[in-house]
Image (cartoon, rainbow, N blue to C red):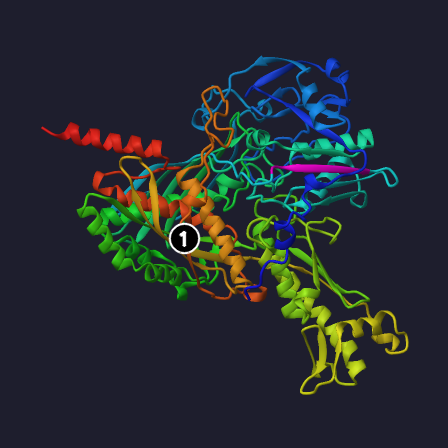
């Protein structure tokens, strides 16, 4: 049902509470002296002048706090994996520009920032490794000497005899693909408030994180502080897109310093700090080849991937998160009989890469969909038709793809056909022919993808991480006033979880929507929580809500049966009432709560049961979501800008809870995908310095660049509770590939193929100039 988001009034009127809005008593402020070098030994740090500065309370280096916590290790049982320790401050050497070296705590941020200039640090500069392909050379400088290599993870997925199948293929297409490093760039920078309570010697960390439960457990272990004295709360969060889904050194530092000083501490990153020190995305190089038979059936796929993962492995996901998922998902929704995907996660002197909306799948979809279009072109088959021939069909589910992932029944073919019909595919082709006759560069691009969502324990355990990402808990109670409060482990970072979860509870419990309060983002809310990531909130949180609602509903019916003198089987619960079916006899939730908690004469003792339902839900395998993106573009050969003329998304996210929220998530995801396809790029020079560290140089799309987006829904219910599928990441997965294919199609008369994203005006200019030069050079 399309209900307006209940959280919006407070957020839009300035009444939300973000971490930086916290005002703990007598709070101190933190500022960080960060490395200006990409790779250097720390020889000496002199902090005496800074300690004497006005308003400064304390100055900490890595050595000063070494005994106050244990480094956090992003453990995994993956073979050939080196886990880099996560420290609160750099110790021994620095490994990227922006790494925190010294923390200053002062009465306010201005005084702390002023004192930073008084710190003297002597470095011994080391050769920096910035190119991941050079980093794998035997004589390359080592980012971590103990690892004895810059390859922190190496994996390979194999099925069938790829070499033989490629050799026997009717045609083979191959290319070198690259997606550049980008910044997630949430509107709210990272922000933390570590609030110390003397009475209990405890800390409450307010954090702009989407994984408060994981952060709490990691800090508890690091600080040797039990969970009942360490609470982590994610209040209103102004976006994450993955970058706030890991534990950061600053979170460790603030908690260590708060405990050491017995004071509350606050820190909010400025935009430069956020861009240069938060985890980044993509940075993948892929050499890939696909073979087809004469009918256009893809029979073999081979890929070698190098992921530039930066200086550290992230907690808890490890540095393998992005690059390993590229090779895991590369076969996509297609029936490819043989496959080899090899990947190396390579350390460089840059900030770590980490989760980003779509995690690996924007890259794998870009590569697979470009190869599909290249195969169609080589065979003279329409791009729509070649996908029809290769997609997993309805009667073939469940289907195990060549990398081992299992897709449950999903509308792959239905999404493809729906997008083509909505776009008027044949009329678009006519438009294209007319445009080309006029000398215009008009292109049509398709991208079809599949993703795992709401992953359960069977998938979550595969990387061997020491955390449970495969289940979620819901605790729902009716209090003595009849009000309903529901607590969850998932954590919203702007996607409307309060509304979505309340809708599920209203439907399944039979409560009034407006009587339901949703608590999420609080590590104290449920015994075990992790947070929100990997399109899991509706599937896992919603599944837990449905089961907990059913348990509580049965308790309500049992009490109502006594009050209404009817069998519990004859009681209906809806709209905040329990009624006898077929009659006008009913009682409100408030009357039921009064009978249980207050009126000792109404119920027999055995019927006086607390009105609470709790359930931990594990969907075991999770479920599949899929979509087709279809886009039409025109390339201006003079300005080298790409104009998007039409954008269609046909997606299958299962049973839709709130169409307004689903459409909003698709629109936002596509906007980010357009950024990755055309604009956004973190540029580092040869010395390892970031030269696109501000919003002057790092370009993101504005409302002007985002077209009208038509969204179509294929509601095929999944096998998980409620029939839901995750859908928060899909826009970013499909958009880069669809736009890359559209640009390639537009420029195909010039023999241009797109293999690098983003396709900025500068890159387009270079491609066009090369094409023109080649044409001139071939003339007699």
* Quarter of the image where the C terminus is located: top left
Per the image, label 1 sits on a secondary structure element best described as: loop
Residue 492 or 701: which is nearer the viewer? Answer: 701
Q: Nearer the viewer, residue 48 or 280?
A: 48
Q: Residue at x 42, y 47 (%)?
A: 706
User: Could you tell me if residue 295 is visible in this image?
Assistant: no
- Residue at 61% from the left image edge and 48% from the top image edge: 493
- The part of the chain drawn in magenta is 189-196
* Residue 338 point in image, percent of width and height: 37, 49
Point 44% across, 39% down: residue: 342
Q: Residue furthest bottom?
A: 583
* Residue under numbered circle 1: 708
- Residue at the extreme front of the image, as rendered: 13
Taking the spot 62% from the left edge, 62% from the top edge, the residue there is: 543
- 46 w.r.t. 698: above or below: above
Q: Nearer the viewer, residue 522 or 89?
A: 522
Predominant SS along the magenta part: strand
Q: Farthest residue in the left direction?
A: 780
- In this view, 50 is above or below 235: above
């Amino acid at each position: 049902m399309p209900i307006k988001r209940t959280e919006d009034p407070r957020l839009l009127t300035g009444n939300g509470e973000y971490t930086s809005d916290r005002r703990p008593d007598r709070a101190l402020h933190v500022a960080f002296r960060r490395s200006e070098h990409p790779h250097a030994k720390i020889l000496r740090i002199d902090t005496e002048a800074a300690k004497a500065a006005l308003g400064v309370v304390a100055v900490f280096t890595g050595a000063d706090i070494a005994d106050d916590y244990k480094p956090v290790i992003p453990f995994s049982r993956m073979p050939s994996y080196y886990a880099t320790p996560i420290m609160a401050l750099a110790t021994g050497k620095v490994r990227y520009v922006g790494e925190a070296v010294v923390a200053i705590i002062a009465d306010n941020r201005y005084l702390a920032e002023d004192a930073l200039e008084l710190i003297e640090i002597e470095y011994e500069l080391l050769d920096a490794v910035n190119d991941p392909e050079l980093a794998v050379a035997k004589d390359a400088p080592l980012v971590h000497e103990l690892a004895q290599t810059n390859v922190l993870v190496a994996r390979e997925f194999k099925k069938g005899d790829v070499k033989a199948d490629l050799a026997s293929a009717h045609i083979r297409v191959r290319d070198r693909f690259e997606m550049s490093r980008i910044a997630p760039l949430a509107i709210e920078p990272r922000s933390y408030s570590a609030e110390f309570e003397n009475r209990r010697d405890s800390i409450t960390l307010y954090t702009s994180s989407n994984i408060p439960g994981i952060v709490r457990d990691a800090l508890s272990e690091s600080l040797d502080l039990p969970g009942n004295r360490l609470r982590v709360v994610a209040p209103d969060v102004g976006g994450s897109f993955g970058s706030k889904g890991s534990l950061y050194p600053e979170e460790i530092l603030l908690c260590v310093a708060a405990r050491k000083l017995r004071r509350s501490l606050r820190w909010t990153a400025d935009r430069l700090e956020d861009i240069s020190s938060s985890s980044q995305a993509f940075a993948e190089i892929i050499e890939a080849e696909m073979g087809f038979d004469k009918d256009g059936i893809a029979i073999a796929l081979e890929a070698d991937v190098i992921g530039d993962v930066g200086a550290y492995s992230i907690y808890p996901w490890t540095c393998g998160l992005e690059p390993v998922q590229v090779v895991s998902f590369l076969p996509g929704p297609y029936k490819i009989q043989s496959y080899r995907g090899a990947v190396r996660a390579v350390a460089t002197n840059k900030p770590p890469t980490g989760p980003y909306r779509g995690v690996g799948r924007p890259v794998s979809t870009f590569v697979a969909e470009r190869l599909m279009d290249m195969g169609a072109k080589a065979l003279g088959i329409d791009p729509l038709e070649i996908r029809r021939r290769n997609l997993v069909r309805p009667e073939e589910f469940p289907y195990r793809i060549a990398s081992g992932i299992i897709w449950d029944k999903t509308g792959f073919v239905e999404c493809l056909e729906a997008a083509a019909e909505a776009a008027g595919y044949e009329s678009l082709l006519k438009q294209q022919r007319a445009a080309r006759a006029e000398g215009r560069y008009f292109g049509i691009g398709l991208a079809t993808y599949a993703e795992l969502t709401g992953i359960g324990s069977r998938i979550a355990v595969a990387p061997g991480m020491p955390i449970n990402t495969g289940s979620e808990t819901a605790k729902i109670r009716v209090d003595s006033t009849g009000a309903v409060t529901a607590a969850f482990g998932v954590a919203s970072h702007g996607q409307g979880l309060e509304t979505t979860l309340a809708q599920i509870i209203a439907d399944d419990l039979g409560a009034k929507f407006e009587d339901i309060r949703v608590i999420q983002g609080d590590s104290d809310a449920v015994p075990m929580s992790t947070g929100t990531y990997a399109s899991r909130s509706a599937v896992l949180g919603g599944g837990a809500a449905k089961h907990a609602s059913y348990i509580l509903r049965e308790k309500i019916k049992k009490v109502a049966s006594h009050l209404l003198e009817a069998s519990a089987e004859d009681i209906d619960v809806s709209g905040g009432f329990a009624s006898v079916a077929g009659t006008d006899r009913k009682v409100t939730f408030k009357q039921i709560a009064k009978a249980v908690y207050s009126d000792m004469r109404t119920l027999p003792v055995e019927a006086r049961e607390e009105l609470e339902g709790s359930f931990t839900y594990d969907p075991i395998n999770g479920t599949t979501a899929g979509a087709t993106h279809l886009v039409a573009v025109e390339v201006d050969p003079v300005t080298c800008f790409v104009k998007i003329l039409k954008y269609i998304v046909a997606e299958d996210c299962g049973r839709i809870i709130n169409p307004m929220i689903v459409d909003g998530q698709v629109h936002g995801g596509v906007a980010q995908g357009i950024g990755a396809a055309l604009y956004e790029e973190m540029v580092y020079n040869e010395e390892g310095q970031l030269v696109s560290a501000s919003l002057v140089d790092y370009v993101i799309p504005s409302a002007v660049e985002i077209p009208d987006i038509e969204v179509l829904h294929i509601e095929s219910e999944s096998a998980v509770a409620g029939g839901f599928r995750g859908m928060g990441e899909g826009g970013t997965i499909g958009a880069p590939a669809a736009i890359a294919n559209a640009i390639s199609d537009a420029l195909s008369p010039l023999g241009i193929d797109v293999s690098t994203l983003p396709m900025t005006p500068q890159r387009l200019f270079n491609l066009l100039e090369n094409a023109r030069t080649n044409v001139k050079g071939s003339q007699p």
